[in-house]
């Protein structure tokens, strides 16, 4: 099946630093990728929808200047948490929708393994 | 509006059957997913229903009634490894996932 990787899997950083998380679709192209955040014992919260070659669409309440998303190719999207603070500590998960899946087609998203961010 | 409801937690016995219900109100409904998520891991796909009826896949089955805005995930022959959270997610007219809060399933020996 389709595989999505994320790097790093775990990161610990000091408050005020920036952290970049990569999301790659390994064996398929993904025009659209999604970034989620999940706090302990809570459901996934969609942060933004990333479309290759265009600006990301952010969900209400998500600061686009703090969470920078770049989707420069059909297989790579990056999320940069700028000036991270302890409250940004969370599990960040990306997913990718294969290009060509639209309309009445099967519109599954394939998830990366997630990145555990801890900000001290 | 968009709304997904599922029970917060359920407990079942190893070897038994459990049904996890999900109700949804989704504009432009385009199908419903069930995902399994173990603690500290990303969700993994279980099933996708877009038409009414029951889809069976091994020990797991998923049912959908579009007219009732209702779905359930049925797990048979429960194993200890089935202890996880089960997330129900509908898709809207833009094929965006709308997530339920998840049902934590606890399996007891």
Image (spheres, helix red, strand yellow):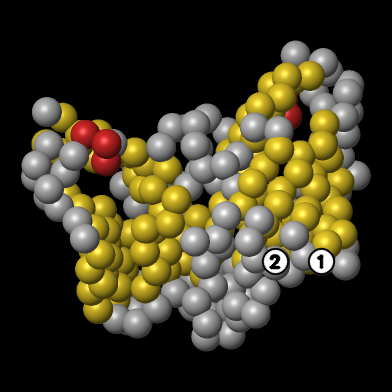
Q: Provide the chain ID for the residue under circle 1.
A: A
Residue B1 image label: none
Give percent across and percent down for residue A57: 79, 61
Please tell me which residue is depicted at 67% across the width and 57% down the height of the picture. Answer: A25
Q: Quadrant of residue A117?
A: top right
**Around disc 1, counting alpha carbons within 10 Å, would you say few (fewer than 14), some (14 to 19), or many (20 or more)?**
some
Which is more toward the observer, A13 or A47? A13
* Residue depicted at x 88% and y 23%: A17
Query: Disc 1 on helix, strand or loop?
Result: loop
Q: Is residue B50 visible?
A: yes
Let me know if marks 1 and 2 both belong to one chain: yes
Circles 1, 2 touching at the beta carbon (< 8 Å): yes
Q: Which residue is mark 1?
A: A52
Residue A30 horizontal/vertical position (percent): 70, 66
For the point 78% across and 53% down, which residue is it?
A: A77
Q: Residue at x 65, y 65 (%)?
A: A28
Is A106 displayed left or right of A73 in the figure? left
Binning the other alpha carbons within 10 Å of mark 2 as few (below 14), some (14 to 19) or many (20 upward) gives many
Q: In which quarter of the view is residue A15 placed?
A: top right
Residue A30 has which mark? 2
Looking at the image, residue B71 lies above or below residue B16? below
Of B6 and A112, nearer the camera is A112
Instruction: Give the number of callouts.
Output: 2
Mark toward the start of the polypeptide (1 vs 2)? 2
Answer left or right for B87 relative to A96: left
Quadrant assignment for the C terminus of chain B: top left
- If the image is split into quadrants, where does the N terminus of chain B sit? bottom right
In the rendered image, the residue lying farthest to the front is A27
């Amino acid at each position: 099946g389709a595989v999505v990787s994320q790097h790093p899997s775990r990161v610990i950083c000091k408050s005020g630093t920036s952290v970049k998380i990569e999301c790659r679709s390994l064996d398929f192209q993904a025009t659209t990728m999604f970034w989620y955040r999940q706090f302990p014992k809570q459901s996934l919260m969609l942060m933004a929808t990333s479309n290759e070659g265009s600006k990301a669409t952010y969900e209400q309440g998500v600061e686009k200047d703090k969470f920078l998303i770049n989707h420069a190719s059909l297989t790579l999207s990056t999320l940069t948490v700028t000036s991270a603070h302890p409250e940004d500590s969370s599990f960040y998960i990306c997913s990718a929708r294969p290009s060509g899946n639209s309309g009445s087609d099967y519109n599954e998203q394939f998830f990366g393994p997630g990145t555990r961010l801890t900000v001290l | 509006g968009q709304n997904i409801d599922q029970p917060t937690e359920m407990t079942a016995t190893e070897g038994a059957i459990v049904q996890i219900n999900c109700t949804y109100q989704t504009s432009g409904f385009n199908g419903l997913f069930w995902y399994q998520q173990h603690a500290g891991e990303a969700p993994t796909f279980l099933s996708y229903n877009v038409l009414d009826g029951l889809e069976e896949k091994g020990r797991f089955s998923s049912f959908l009634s579009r007219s009732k805005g209702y779905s359930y995930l049925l797990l048979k022959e429960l194993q200890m490894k089935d202890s996880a959270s089960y997330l129900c997610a509908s898709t809207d007219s833009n094929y965006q996932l709308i997530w339920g809060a998840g049902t934590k399933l606890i399996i007891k020996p």
